Every structure is written in structure tokens, then in C-alpha cells.
Image (cartoon, rainbow, N blue to C red):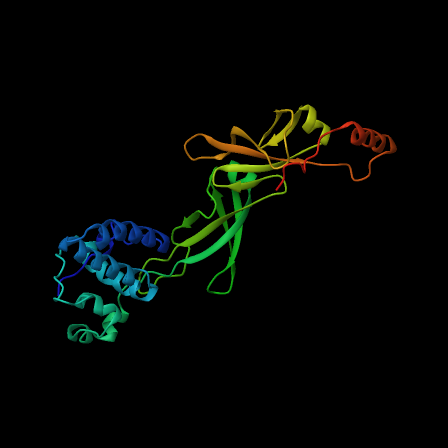
Amino acid sequence: MIFKDYYKILGLEDNKVTPEEIKTAYREQAKKYHPDINSGNNFSEERFKDINEAYKVLSTPSSKRKYDRMWNSNVGRKRKFEESKREEGSIFSNFFNMFFGEKLDSEKKISKKKEAKLPRKGENIETEIDVSIEEAFYGLDKKLSLRMQNGKMKTFTIKIPAGIRNNEKIRLIGQGKKGENGGKNGDLLIKINIVDSKKFSLKGIDLYTDLYITPWEAVLGTKVSVDTIGETIYLHIPQGVESGEKVKIPGKGYKDGKGGRGELIADVKIMIPKKPTKEEIGIFKKLDKVSKFNPRVNVE
């Protein structure tokens, strides 16, 4: 039986990859070799079967661990192997059946004692941590305490880089569960959750904020101060602006990872006084008499 390099089939260089990276690689390769866009291409059809077979094995933690031991013994030692041909009419190969079907006779001959002595890498530990928009924008060191396998608490210092994206993961190599029989320790993966504040919300690389103005400011136009990350700017509001309109301020959003920034988008909200004074009420009554404006005209 000829060994199959499932990582190579998915376009991955080695087995030091996360489940998300495996899923992304699978989608790219499946799209590239899908029969619907490669009609009549026998190679693409066979490749598409290999891609599905590879993902089925690597996306399941138990079968991936088993496969990785074989991968380290073959590809890890730079031995070159050719992919085995599939039996005509068969969807999955005999090699695949080692993970999801009946074991081959040669597999059954491997003693459990020998298998138990093989080095095994420890499992990864995954957790997550909340940071504010400002913390993520500037970057910081964050403390994280976890209870380890021995029951004791261990504190890690997480270096969060400036401009990290929401849901991005930070990997601490070797800080996961211990390996067995001399195998390497697993890794600690920390997902970063960027939490919206009362002032800002984050969507992609754009920041959103509410811009509150009075009715007379909306009618006459005005100049207002707007807080951005790290500074306060002044913004001109044109006459006749309405609630729900959005004013975009380029270069004042979140970091784009290329040295630039997204937009700060101010959502205009026209506010009225909850407890108007007698003088204000008098002015509004006068306005009610003299104004011919009716927002309900021509509304279906």
C-alpha cells in the first residue's frame, strides 16, 4: 500500500496547522477541482475524491492523530511516495479505510504494545479572551490564568499585537497538554474577542459611532466635535441632515494591517429635549404656527 500525503493534497506544507486552516485549505482545493467546473477531466475528478478523503481524515481529531504518526514516519523523514490508484468504482481508497473502515491485515499485525510506545504530541488547548477596541487597536500584554491538568492554576502573559483582528487566534507553542512517550507538548490557542464599547462598535476595519444633534442643528447646520481613537476631531454637519444619515470619516477607523485605517462612520441621531423649558415650548408653538413643513406629505 502506498502512503498518501493528505496535507500535500490540501495544499498544506506540513501538519502544524489548526482545524480552521485545514477547513480553509479544503474549501480552496474543493472549489478548484470540483467536477462542476472541470467537466470531463478525469484527473480533477480523482483529485476531488482525494481532497474529500483528506479532509475527512484530517478534520477528525482521533483520525488526524493516527494519521500524523504515519505522516511523521514517512514525509517527516523526506521519503517520497506516490499516491496509490483507486479501485475502479470505489469512492474511498484502502488507505482511507485505515481511518474509517475495516483495518487492513497489515494494520492488524501491528502490536498494541509497539503502538503505545510511539511518540504522541499532546492535544492543543483552546480558550478565548475579551479585549476592548482600544486595547486591540494599540496592542497590550494581557494576563490569562488557566487550570492545568495537574489541577494547579498557571498564569500566562499574552502579547496582543496592535491591530489584531476580531476572532484571530494567538498560539503559544508547547503550552498545551503534555505529549506522551517523548512527544511534543500541544499548543495553547487563544481566540481574541474584540468587545464593542458604548462609544464604538467594530465591523471589519470600520468603526461606528452615534452622533447626537439637536433639531435646530439639523436645520441650520453646525460644527460638532467627534471622538475617535486617540483624538477628537471637528466635523461639519450640513443643513437639512436627517436622522439615520451616516457621515463617513476616512482614515479614522480600525487598523487595516497594511499601515492604513478604515473609516469612522457616524450615525446621525436627532434628539429632542425631554423636559423643555417654557421658553422652548413657546418657540416650538410659534414654529408650529408659522412652518408649512409637513413630513407626512407624499408618504404612501
Q: Quadrant of the N terminus?
A: bottom left
Residue 162 vertical position relative to residue 170 in the rendered view, above or below: above
Query: Which residue of the protein is positioned furthest toward the right in this rendering?
Result: 278
Q: Is 274 on the left-hand or right-hand side of 204?
A: right
The answer to whether residue 79 shows anywhere in this view is no
Q: Residue 274 appears at what percent x and percent y?
A: 79, 40
Residue at horizontal 75 percent and vertical 28 percent from the top: 291
Residue at horizontal 15 percent and vertical 73 percent from the top: 106
Q: Residue 21 appears at what percent x and percent y?
A: 34, 51
Q: Residue 42 appears at what percent x and percent y?
A: 13, 55
Residue 288 vertical position relative to residue 122 in the rendered view, above or below: above
Place residue 93 in its image quadrant: bottom left
| Residue closer to the observer: 32 or 218 | 218
Q: Quadrant of the C terminus?
A: top right
Q: Is 256 on the left-hand or right-hand side of 247?
A: left
Q: How many numbered discs sit on the rendered protein? A: 0
Q: Residue 259 appears at what percent x and percent y?
A: 43, 30
| Residue closer to the observer: 74 or 25 | 25
Place residue 23 in its image quadrant: bottom left
| Residue closer to the observer: 72 or 275 | 275
Q: Is 289 on the left-hand or right-hand side of 207?
A: right
| Residue closer to the observer: 210 or 119 | 210
